[in-house]
Amino acid sequence: DAGVTQSPTHLIKTRGQQVTLRCSPKSGHDTVSWYQQALGQGPQFIFQYYEEEERQRGNFPDRFSGHQFPNYSSELNVNALLLGDSALYLCASSLSQLHGYTFGSGTRLTVV
Amino acid sequence: GENVEQHPSTLSVQEGDSAVIKCTYSDSASNYFPWYKQELGKGPQLIIDIRSNVGEKKDQRIAVTLNKTAKHFSLHITETQPEDSAVYFCAASDSGGGADGLTFGKGTHLIIQP
């Protein structure tokens, strides 16, 4: 049973560029959430997608956007990258409101 | 919004001893409290969770306690083993199932000394 799959695992971008990160949820899960984890910190909630719509959003600017596809996979897009966007981006999936999250191993984004 | 404080930031214990990590939360509406273990290069892994209608939950060597009045919850690991070394995070959510956004603590680096 495959867990949550994220791609790419590592990425280096230049300040001002745009980036797209991808996530495939665990089989049977229909809800995808994205978190940002800075070095030495706990994950911070970015947003959650359910039924292809953004259901809940954390305290992140509009530069952060996402999408969920009919097969429940998801993308996180970040525009106009800042140095401070360098972090581990984690995708987590769950089954509606009844179960806890399963996290992927993340995408390490470095902005230079 | 919710704020979760976690202590200590680093905990070193002898192999075989017990480890306790404590968290406090601010939002009385929070009702779901999971604990995650994160090893180097990996994503957080759910190890145990508790909902607000329960005061204590155990799973083999791991237990979690919740004091809703004081807004405290704690992780207890007994008979620690080298493979318990990792960073542990507590989190809180106002969703009964935890499928909404979680607010995490800053983590505890647990070191098991052989």
Image: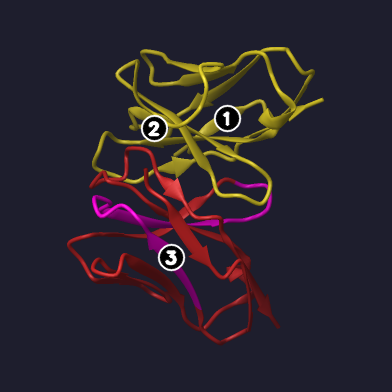
Chain colours: A yellow, B red
Q: Amino acid at mark 2?
A: Ser
**Residue at label 1?**
A6
Of B103 and A72, the residue lying toward us: B103
Q: Secondary structure at mark 2?
A: loop
Is mark 2 in CB contact (under 8 Å) with mark 3?
Answer: no
Q: What numbered label is drawn on residue A27? A: 2
**Residue at label 3?**
B23
Q: Secondary structure at mark 1?
A: strand
CA gap, disc 2 and disc 3 = 32 Å
In this view of the protein, can residue A41 be seen by the observer? yes
Q: Which residue appears at 82% of the width and 25% of the height?
A: A112
Choose the circle earlier in sequence order: 1 or 2: 1
The answer for which chain carries disc 3 is B
Q: Is residue B79 shown left or right of residue A48?
A: right
Q: Secondary structure at mark 3?
A: strand
Residue B1 falls in which quadrant of the image? top left
Classify 10 Å Cα crowding around label 3: few (below 14), some (14-19), many (20 and above): many
Q: Amino acid at mark 3?
A: Cys
